[in-house]
Amino acid sequence: MSGIPFGIKDIFCIKGHEATAGSRILKGFKAPYSATVIERLQSEGAIILGRTNMDEFACGSSTEHSCYGVTRNPHDLERVPGGSSGGSAAAVVDNMCLGALGTDTGGSIRQPASLSGCYGMKPTYGRVSRYGVIAMASSWDTIGPFARSVEDIAIIMQILAGHDSHDSTTPNKPVPDYLSALKGGVKGLKIGVPKEYFGEGVTSEVKTAVMGAIDGLKKKGAIVKEVSLPSTKYAVAIYYISMPAELSANLARYDGVRFGLGLDKAVKDLDEYYELVRGNGFGDEIKRRVIIGTYLLSAGYYDAYYKKAQQVRTLIIEDFNRVFKEVDVLCAPVAPTPAFKLGENLANPLAMYMADALTIPVSVAGLPAMSAPCGMSSGGLPIGLQIIGRQFDEDVVMRVGGSL
């Protein structure tokens, strides 16, 4: 990685540098230490060019919820690049850097990679250390790279992956040689096509491009079969219960007392201080999710909502476990549509949330998945293929991506 220019999503701590997670509430906060992934990249000679824009605290699917303003799609400046890691995807696609780091909680690497037109890898939960990464939802957050080729993804992942004593969720499992895995091809590999990922809301152009890529893999010797993941329909509901609850707990630390935005005027009590700091520091989307999460965790509602969501989360995991007894990987769309216009979904949070409907189930199960470009819409917008593997099978996912 010596001399390779890199972009870093504004959610990673770099010692002595400001890190704001796209939020006013962290204005002026300088990290006292560097994230493990930053140290690993720098130890290999990577050059950190700067920070890339993101939805505030990684909450969003369009990179429109940032205190720095919107990020635009390099293919059409009137459209979104996806989110929340839209700045990283756009920087790679626009040749500002050769690689970039992002985070993926419910689709925030794969979806912007698809909408912007590059490769984006979400590893297995725990494969890459979260130490030094500003938390959104701790049981969901994963860290991964954006790049313009599968080979570059493999090189970056080789550096990022592996156990970290600072993060107890990283198992001490061997990391395979990802570059060597790309030479394996797909002959004899069993690819499952989940029928639930091609249903209502997925445009005909997306279906055509994705099935064209799958047919190309079949011609190279892959065995393709249709499979079913019936619990997929519950994934968005589970995510928007579990994620706001964890977000609410994580964001409780931002009170304007110890770091970030504060007040220099007198207030009558601590409640007023919190109200003013958080009222001015958090954006509308963050406030919406914190309110929902706090409600879900309140007395009388925890068992009815959060606990129930965790139980249904297990059903989705069991769906994937069953299917992966039949196939080696799954191939499906990343997003139901190509990039939408700036402002198109801002007034409709539910429509915005549905932009991640096809990426969230993978996050529910903590599986690895990659977005790989597989075609263009009639309007010249990129379409991505989602390649999903078993836990810690990033090498197999890359092998399929490298065979497109």
Image (cartoon, grey):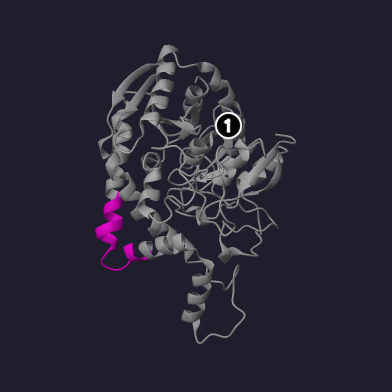
Q: Residue at x 48, y 81 (%)?
A: 272
| Rendering coords of residue 374 (x, y %) | 48, 26
Instruction: Tell me the crowding category of disc 1: few under 14, some 14 to 19, or many 20 or more residues within 10 angstroms, Cα based.
Output: many
Residue at 34% over, 63% down: 297
Quarter-of-image position of residue 18: bottom right
Q: Amino acid at mark 1?
A: Ile
The answer to whether residue 353 is magenta is: no
Seen from the viewer's position, the closer of residues 126 and 332 is 332
Residue at the image point whose x is 50% and y is 34% from the top: 381
Q: Which residue is mark 1?
A: 153
Q: Residue at x 51, y 44 (%)?
A: 79
Q: Nearer the viewer, residue 24 or 68?
A: 68
Residue 146 lies left or right of residue 33; in this view the side is left
Q: Is residue 222 above or below residue 13?
A: above
Q: Nearer the viewer, residue 390 or 255?
A: 255
Task: Identify whether 276 is placed above or below 108.
Answer: below
Name the element at disc 1: helix
Residue range corresponding to the magenta coloring: 294-310
